[in-house]
Amino acid sequence: MNPGDYYRLDLAAIRALPRRDALDLLDKIRLDVTKVTGAERARIVAAEVTEQAAAHGERGAQRRAAAALNMKPARLGQLYQTWETTMTVQAITCSDELAAVLNATPATPEDAAETPRDWIEGIWVNGTVYPLDPDATTDTLAVLADGTAAARFSPKGEFCGGRHRVGIDYDAAHWCAADYETWDYQDARGVVRDWRSVNVWDANGFSETNVYDTVEEAKAAFAEEVAQLQEMSASDDDEDDTRN
């Protein structure tokens, strides 16, 4: 089986570029190929595990799949966990989803050595690329360019106090929502701030989200919305007392 039969590089076009540009482009191609092939490897593993479970039962399905694919069980388990995370998070709409993607088992040792600074051009999830903010992102903080999500790295042994979309070992090193706060009144109305975005909602289906230029502005807007909703809720309580 010749890998070159399954993909093509326009080497003539690449060689026509200035050498610095050609190297940058090859790095981008390498990252894209690594992400796509890693996701496909996880999909293949998940398909085999599902087939083994359907044919012989859930117990031992991963072990049988590893044997069928000529893989070490530990490596198959890592890829299967990556697939489960991908299936849990179909898109990045908030910080805990971003954290869940970052907590997925790396597809390769090279991926494991990377930090968010290596992913500025985007994190690939289910066919969509989510660019990172180059000014706000660091080795331990990943911030989406649109300001709607941010995840920070919590070292091993430290309680992060953050939110998690997918279950994790809280004592292990992991990613969690970087800066999130919420307030609600009896599930009737509330406000959520996630990094630079602020969402106001009520149980009647109203929902409005604004993204601010800075986290500080978002925090101020959150506090203002909370104050208004508290005043509204106090009025509701007074009306209930009057009726009773």
Image (cartoon, rainbow, N blue to C red):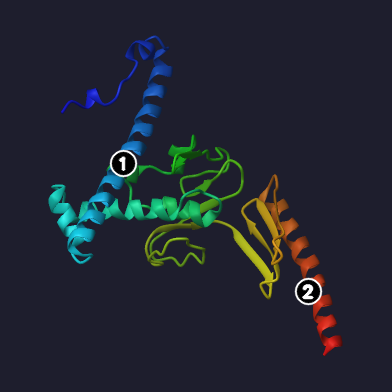
* Residue 179 % position (x, y): 59, 57
Task: Look at the numbered disc 2 and give the secondary structure of its residue.
Answer: helix
Distance (Cα) linking label 1 and label 2: 50 Å
Q: Quadrant of residue 190?
A: bottom right
Q: Going by the image, does 118 lie left or right of 78?
A: right
Density class for disc 1 (Cα within 10 Å; few <14, some 14-19, many ≥20) is some
Q: Quadrant of the C terminus?
A: bottom right
- Asked whether 51 or 162 is in front, the reply is 51
Q: Which residue lies furthest to the right in this view?
A: 242
* Residue 230 % position (x, y): 78, 71
Q: In which quarter of the image is the N terminus?
A: top left
* Residue 206 % position (x, y): 72, 59
Task: Look at the numbered disc 1 and give the secondary structure of its residue.
Answer: helix
Q: Residue at x 41, y 23 (%)?
A: 24
Discs 1, 2 touching: Cβ within 8 Å:
no
Amino acid on which disc 2 is placed: Ser
Q: Which residue lies furthest to the front in this view?
A: 55
Quickly name the residue at label 2. 233
Q: Going by the image, does 20 lie left or right of 3?
A: right
Q: Which residue is drawn at 57% across and 43% down?
A: 136
Q: Is residue 52 visible?
A: yes
Q: Quadrant of residue 155?
A: bottom left
- Asked whether 139 or 69 is in front, the reply is 69
Q: Going by the image, does 80 lie left or right of 128?
A: left
Amino acid on which disc 1 is placed: Glu
Q: Eyeballing the image, is 171 above or below 175? A: below
Q: Residue 40 carries which label?
A: 1
Q: Residue at x 43, y 51 (%)?
A: 101
Density class for disc 2 (Cα within 10 Å; few <14, some 14-19, many ≥20) is some
Q: Is residue 103 visible?
A: no
Q: Eyeballing the image, is 171 above or below 68? A: below
